[in-house]
Image: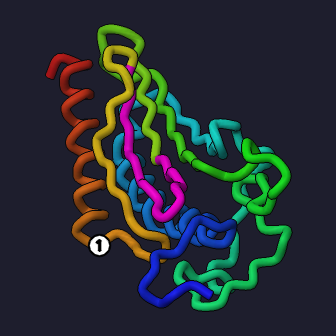
Amino acid sequence: RVADNEDPVKSPILIYNAFNYLNSKIWPILLTSLESFESLFSESKINHFVNEQIEKFETTTINLMTHPFIQTKSTAPKSEKIFGHSIYNIYNDKDLINSVKWEQTMYGLKGAKNVTNYKITLIGVFNTSNFTTILNVYTEKQAEQVIYNITKKYGDTLFTDEIQQLNNALKKRLLEDIRNDIGA
């Protein structure tokens, strides 16, 4: 039995709960911001990755009412998956879920002097006793840049102002990059 004052240690259900939190509370906010930029591009595409492997099947919505982020007792069925990858695999360390990534690529910035594509990634990294949320923006002119990085204990969530900071960092970076690329 773990003492009440000890931090929880990485387990499949804690990874699953952290993933659900990022997938249902953080990514949708970022997507809403990204939608306001999509008309500036010719097209866009979203991909999902687990341990840098692309999702195994089309993403489906999971009923979050049956898996709230914070649980005192957790009983997730052994069939639970994250983007098609099972959260339960004890036979091979490389198959344990260590990271998930949401990636939106926006192609062909309209009005740019050169073909300009943008890649925005939200990454959840599952460490032993906490998880890290990383937001990156990448363009052809600039290597991938971390624009926001925060670490929380399993079971903790981002504060409202932290979510706002993350979202504002994304919008600010995109506005700066787009202005530079179209010479405005």
Number of residues whose C-alpha sits closer than 10 Å to that of mark 1, classed few (under 14), some (14–19) or many (20 or more) = few
Question: Is 33 displayed left or right of 108 in the figure?
Answer: left
Q: Residue at x 43, y 22 (%)?
A: 117
Measured as percent of width and height from the top left, residue 104 is found at: 51, 39
Q: Residue furthest top?
A: 114
* Pick the front one: 178 or 140: 140
Measured as percent of width and height from the top left, residue 57 is found at: 80, 48
Question: Is 80 displayed left or right of 40 in the figure?
Answer: right
Q: Residue at x 58, y 48 (%)?
A: 99
Q: Residue at x 62, y 88 (%)?
A: 1
Quadrant housing the C terminus:
top left
The residue indicated by pointer 1 is 159
Measured as percent of width and height from the top left, residue 180 is found at: 19, 21
Measured as percent of width and height from the top left, residue 106 is found at: 47, 32
Residue 176 sits inside the magenta stretch: no
Residue 14 sits above or below residue 23 on the image: below
Q: Residue furthest left?
A: 184
Three-letter code for the amino acid on which mark 1 is drawn: Phe
Residue 111 sits above or below residue 11 on the image: above
Find the magenta span and give its range.
Answer: 123-139
Give the image quarter of residue 150. bottom left
Tell me the chief SS of the magenta region.
strand
